[in-house]
């Protein structure tokens, strides 16, 4: 395979049996349109068990799908003068308080107005290049509608150090959240692997078969009539981890439109989740550094309403 193609490989599970190939692929690879996928199938870029098939092919359990996706040309990302709420800065690192509604890095449909666009303007050329032109300085991320502390690395030394601490699960990450229902226990732990939801490839889920280990510790800070204000501490950092874990124990986040079936009576933009504390060993000094992002105004206001 040449360097203008990237490979997508997957094995079909029992829940996907008898689904049309083109329909399954359009949900599994959300960035590509169904018409584009059908063209790729017609051009024999999709192989089932090593052989091309029609778009109408019905998938079978254990079918091996290999899709050679033409790599898109990476667009030029522009620096933009977007105000940043800076919690900490030095020659190695920038720690920002990401606002609600801001995407962390450019992706299809979001090539401007992202945190990366803002950071590129603020830091100029002082950003690590390990994650390429779309994610300069980015070593971890939080969801679009999650607020709070995020580390930006200004050089590759800092990036490698923080990435290693993330890998070893030694970074302190404490979140604040409001969940549906009243939690009786003062504290608890959810230890359940997280992977793609086999029924909806755009979502994550508890996935015992194909998930990666995920551990979330939570403790109750305040109880209300129908909700609970909690602190969550991550031992691992899987995509949507707190949202999936709290939903799995019957306490989805207030405002979460993806992992909760319960409607919010308040005017919220997504889940009530805030990355409040981040702590780590500084890449250069070797000393422990802990930064706190204050609760956003909407979150404080909501707590007052719930009292």
Image (spheres, rainbow, N blue to C red):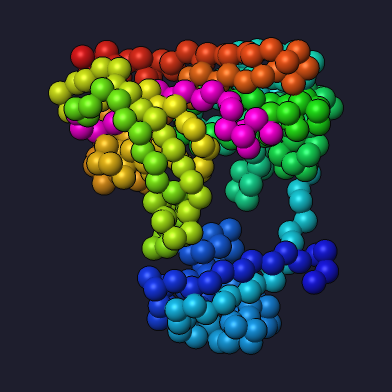
When asked about the image quadrant of residue 224, the answer is top left
Judge by depth and name the residue closer to the eye, 231 or 150. Answer: 231
Residue 250 location (% of width, % of height): 25, 41
User: Is residue 282 magenta-colored?
Assistant: no
- Please say if 177 is above or below 40: above
User: Which residue is at a point 64% across and 66% down the rendered structure image?
Assistant: 8
User: Which residue is at a point 56% across and 87% down the rendered structure image?
Assistant: 54
User: Is residue 172 magenta-colored?
Assistant: yes
Instruction: Locate the C terminus and report the quarter of the image it occupies.
Output: top left
Judge by depth and name the residue closer to the eye, 112 or 5. Answer: 5
Residue 154 visible from this viewpoint: yes
Count of labels in the image:
0
Residue 81 location (% of width, % of height): 70, 23
Instruction: Locate the N terminus and report the quarter of the image it occupies.
Output: bottom right
User: Which residue is at a point 74% across and 61% down the rendered structure image?
Assistant: 71
Judge by depth and name the residue closer to the eye, 230 or 138. Answer: 230
Residue 139 location (% of width, % of height): 67, 34
User: Which residue is at a point 63% across and 13% down the rendered structure image?
Assistant: 289
When asked about the image quadrant of residue 66, the answer is bottom right
Residue interval drawn in magenta: 164-182
When asked about the image quadrant of residue 232, the answer is top left
Residue 281 location (% of width, % of height): 67, 19
Residue 34 visible from this viewpoint: no
């Amino acid at each position: 395979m040449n360097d203008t193609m990237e490979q997508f490989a997957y094995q079909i599970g029992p829940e996907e049996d008898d689904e049309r190939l083109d329909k399954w692929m359009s949900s599994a690879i959300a960035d590509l349109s169904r018409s584009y996928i059908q063209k790729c199938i017609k051009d024999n870029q999709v192989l089932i068990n090593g052989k091309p098939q029609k778009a109408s092919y019905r998938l079978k359990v254990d079918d091996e799908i290999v899709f050679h996706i033409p790599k898109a040309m990476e667009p030029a990302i522009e620096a933009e003068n977007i105000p940043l709420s800076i919690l900490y800065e030095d020659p190695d690192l920038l720690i920002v308080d990401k606002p609600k509604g801001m995407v962390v890095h450019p992706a299809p449909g979001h090539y401007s107005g992202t945190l990366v666009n803002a950071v590129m303007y603020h830091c100029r050329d002082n950003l690590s290049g390990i994650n390429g032109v779309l994610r300069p300085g980015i070593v971890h991320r939080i969801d679009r509608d999650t607020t709070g502390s995020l580390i930006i690395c200004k050089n590759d030394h800092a990036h490698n150090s923080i990435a290693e601490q993330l890998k070893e699960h030694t970074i302190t990450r404490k979140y604040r959240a409001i969940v549906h229902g009243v939690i009786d226990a003062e504290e608890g732990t959810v230890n359940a692997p997280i992977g793609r939801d086999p029924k909806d490839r755009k979502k994550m889920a508890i996935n015992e078969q194909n998930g990666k280990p995920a551990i979330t510790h939570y403790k109750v800070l305040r109880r209300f009539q129908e909700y609970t204000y909690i602190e969550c501490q991550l031992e691992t950092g899987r995509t949507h981890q707190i949202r999936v874990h709290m939903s799995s124990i019957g306490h989805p986040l207030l405002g979460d439109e993806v992992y909760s079936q319960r409607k919010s009576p308040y005017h919220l933009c997504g889940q009530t989740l805030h990355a409040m504390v981040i702590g780590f060993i500084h890449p250069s000094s070797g000393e422990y550094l802990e930064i706190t992002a204050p609760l956003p105004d909407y979150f404080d206001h909501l707590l007052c309403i719930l009292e």
